[in-house]
Amino acid sequence: MREMPDSPKFALVTFVVYAVVLYNVNSVFWKFVFIGYVVFRLLRTDFGRRALATLPRDFAGLKLLISVKSTIRGLFKKDRPIHEIFLNQVKQHPNKVAIIEIESGRQLTYQELNALANQYANLYVSEGYKMGDVVALFMENSIDFFAIWLGLSKIGVVSAFINSNLKLEPLAHSINVSKCKSCITNINLLPMFKAAREKNLISDEIHVFLAGTQVDGRHRSLQQDLHLFSEDEPPVIDGLNFRSVLCYIYTSGTTGNPKPAVIKHFRYFWIAMGAGKAFGINKSDVVYITMPMYHSAAGIMGIGSLIAFGSTAVIRKKFSASNFWKDCVKYNVTATQYIGEICRYLLAANPCPEEKQHNVRLMWGNGLRGQIWKEFVGRFGIKKIGELYGSTEGNSNIVNVDNHVGACGFMPIYPHIGSLYPVRLIKVDRATGELERDKNGLCVPCVPGETGEMVGVIKEKDILLKFEGYVSEGDTAKKIYRDVFKHGDKVFASGDILHWDDLGYLYFVDRCGDTFRWKGENVSTTEVEGILQPVMDVEDATVYGVTVGKMEGRAGMAGIVVKDGTDVEKFIADITSRLTENLASYAIPVFIRLCKEVDRTGTFKLKKTDLQKQGYDLVACKGDPIYYWSAAEKSYKPLTDKMQQDIDTGVYDRI
Ligand SMILES: *[C@@H]1O[C@H](CO)[C@@H](O)[C@H](O)[C@H]1NC(C)=O
Ligand SMILES: *[C@@H]1O[C@H](CO)[C@@H](O)[C@H](O)[C@H]1NC(C)=O
Ligand SMILES: *[C@@H]1O[C@H](CO)[C@@H](O)[C@H](O)[C@H]1NC(C)=O
Ligand SMILES: *[C@@H]1O[C@H](CO)[C@@H](O)[C@H](O)[C@H]1NC(C)=O
């Protein structure tokens, strides 16, 4: 028998022809013979084998897509704001525990939580707040954080979720760009707000309200006044619907100031419900929230499960590796979220009995890398990992629906799937970040087996595929590419490089710009971080390129936080062998900095830009020990003032 040409298009056409024939054959016997024949023919082609192998996954994906889309389209028809969806949950199980705050031990049922939200809403009505006004929420994880924004959403007031780790300039910037009328904070964070105000960074017109039980006598305490306000639903607001703006969530880049992204009611619900459906989150789940609720991970996908599924949330103010599994046991947690850093902290923690006793069946999030995936699920006995990839503001998200190690999602390998799902990969020049374009000026889509930037097709007519953008128009423009697949089209640029393997699984590779050139080669910071981060003594490691005197390109540098009590000499020897074993010589970091004090962004990540600015300058690094790589001896040596000078001037260049 002749081989079928190994072209996906040809295979598809053939398949469709077969399907049509099959449909028209009446005899069961001949049907079976025919199916057997088709499968046999398909298996003789490489594409056919891959297509058959991935069929169950693609089917599951399609089912999910249809279910999510039909739910959301149904809600668009009703066009009601999100709190009414929450009210349905309240009506169904008013006395079910909705939310528990670990530190205070406070817990509220659905009915009580809704009553609290109503009091906040009614208080702000009495303050004269109207639809479209903005209130900045500068608070830590708490019941009130959720109750306040839910309450404000009932009267059309938009909440701006401010990163509670911010200080001075970035804090003031975040508050300023939200154009808020007032800010709600608490007694712990008030000093940060005041410090920024004393430097005239925050306008005096922005009032401050205090949440929480502690007061200072000078600022209005919401808690003290709440009892004056009704627990009944606030007045219904005309024009408040599923398309209204709900909140601003800031994307916390490691560069530049935080940018607020506009989150509308439907988008909030869509993300929460989509992620939840993908991983089977439901009413019986107890969701443990340890990540900051001002980010979309915990703020939408975590706490949003109350609205979308009616589950129970257990909130901890800050992630704590030593309490993690204890909390999970104590509160019967069944599902919780992660980011790569959390997984590494948990793996680095000393074993405890609770890590085997808990009932957590699902952990979902982003950044569990292939290198530690198996160790992680093995040690903690997690049945399902829901790795997903998406951005707060982007119009496209992908999920790993079938526990495939290391993947953050998939795209079926059939061609032209784009019209069904808007995600694509396109080729970019990794060194410059420029898009590759063909002779017609269009971008070059990747095929399975290739690596490129992920983009989401924007369709202005389809509300689900629109890109809502940021509060600032300029920021929005920067994230859009034009003339990509055809002239006049637009896509959302994710800024992330993904690899698409032969079976259609997608793997996160890099942030664009997270590569640098050294000795004429491209070094991926993520790859080097992937080598360092699993090391036992490493609490956190980040890799970046620094300029060295007149040398071309950038030399790799690793900023590492080691655990207390680490034997540094042994540690350097350990990582030396790990790095030399795993990396090409040009990718081995030229400098190692052992950071004592760490300035972290809200998501636990070491701040790359600051580290990069300080480079290997001993003064700028404020006494952190720095080691340099001696290529001749293949080992790290402590950097001295004299050596720093020699490297700067090029006297020593054997790095
Ligand atoms: C915020 O706005 C105030 C008043 O409009 C201004 O004085 C201040 O410089 C701004 N702060 C920042 C960080 O942009
Ligand atoms: C719902 O959640 C419970 C508790 O985690 C779990 O046991 C059950 O399998 C889930 N149901 C579905 C359909 O995923
Ligand atoms: C956890 O589950 C056990 C048994 O199922 C139950 O006795 C206990 O009350 C639950 N604890 C909490 C905090 O819900
Ligand atoms: C490095 O990246 C540039 C730009 O993407 C590419 O042209 C070049 O071939 C790459 N070099 C290597 C050695 O991979």
Image (cartoon, rainbow, N blue to C red):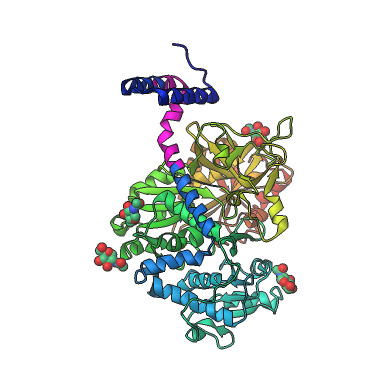
Front residue of 516/31: it is 31
Q: In this view, does 387 lie above or below 437?
A: below
The percent coordinates of residue 467 (x first, y second) are 63, 52
- Percent position (x, y) of residue 236? 55, 73
Taking the spot 46% from the left edge, 55% from the top edge, the residue there is: 273
Above or below, 111 against 289 in this view is below
Q: Position of residue 541 (x, y in %)?
A: 53, 52
Residue 215 in view (yes/no): yes
* Membership of 59 in magenta stretch: yes
Ligand 3 is found in the corner quadrant, namely bottom left
The residue shown at (56%, 52%) is: 391
Magenta segment range?
A: 40-62
Q: Quadrant of residue 499?
A: top right
Q: Position of residue 264 (x, y in %)?
A: 58, 60
Query: Residue extending furthest bottom?
Result: 217
Question: Camera-side residue: 119 or 554?
Answer: 119
Tell me: 450 left or right of 581: right
User: Which of 459/647 is in front?
Assistant: 459
532 to 231, vertically: above or below: above
Q: Quadrant of the C terminus?
A: top right
Front residue of 319 and 555? 319
Report the predominant secondary structure element of the magenta stretch: helix
Quarter in which the N terminus is drawn: top left
- Residue 534 shows up from this direction: no
Q: Quadrant of residue 518?
A: top right
Residue at point 64%, 72% (across, down)? 133
| In magenta stretch: residue 530 | no
